[in-house]
Amino acid sequence: MEWTADWLRERCLNLYPMQQVEELPQAGEATAAAVLIPVVDRPAGLSVLLTLRTAHLRDHAGQISFPGGRCEPTDSSAVDTALRESREEVGILSEQVSVLAVLPEYWTSTGFRVTPVLGLVAPPLNLQLDDFEVAEVFEPPLAFFLDATNYRREAREYQGQLRHYWAVPWRNYFIWGATAGMFVSLRQSLLGPSHAGT
């Protein structure tokens, strides 16, 4: 199977419904946030730009994530949030992004409800990293995340409870938690319900 920009556009015309893959927060109000799933249309094939967050951040320090963050009152929509945060964090310009789909919210046990925005990004990229938030960026191939054999379920204790989560290691990077969970949902959406599990 050849994963191309045309294939991705076609699949996004009629996405399959996604399942929620992490439990709702136990109590309190969830914080609205949005991320861009930036699929870069490289000559060698589609890749996904991911960020490694800096170690000193209050939320999700040192973790691998999509560009994104909290919704601000000045944002007109989740798409606006995702594009603004991507511009601020890594320097992806809004005019380089073709928004293909707004995926259902992903609720995390840490109190966020995240709207993933799937966008096709046209190179060349003149990335400018926000040194306070982003330690580095890297681009695994999209095909890697569409292969069920690359995923595994793991567990760790969080606030006295055992939490189960998806993990999808790539090279020396450990992608887990909400980011891996959103990749699972993206796989299901693009490939169909038979690909919901791994």
Image: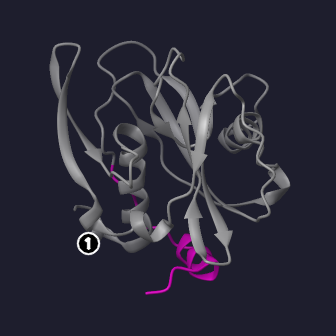
**Is residue 110 placed above or below 80 in the rendered structure?**
above
**Percent position (x, y) of residue 22?**
30, 38
Q: Quadrant of the C terminus?
A: bottom left
Q: Which residue is mark 1?
A: 194
Mark 1 crowdedness (10 Å alpha carbons): few <14, some 14-19, many ≥20: few
Q: Amino acid at mark 1?
A: Ser
Residue situated in front as seen by the camera: 4 or 47? 47
The residue shown at (43%, 43%) is: 179
Residue situated in front as seen by the camera: 196 or 171? 171
Could you tell whether 83 is left or right of 95 in the image? left
**Percent position (x, y) of residue 192?**
35, 72
Whether 30 is among the magenta residues is: no
The residue shown at (61%, 78%) is: 44
Where disc 1 sits, the SS reads helix
Could you tell whether 149 is left or right of 50 in the image? left
The residue shown at (63%, 82%) is: 6
Residue situated in front as seen by the camera: 7 or 66? 66
**Span colored in magenta:** 1-19
> Which residue is situated farthest in the bottom direction here?
1
Whether 2 is among the magenta residues is: yes
Could you tell whether 122 is left or right of 119 in the image? right
**Percent position (x, y) of residue 119?**
65, 58
Could you tell whether 5 is left or right of 53 in the image? right
Which quadrant of the figure has residue 89?
top right
Q: Count how many numbered circles sit on residues in the image.
A: 1
Q: Quadrant of the N terminus?
A: bottom left
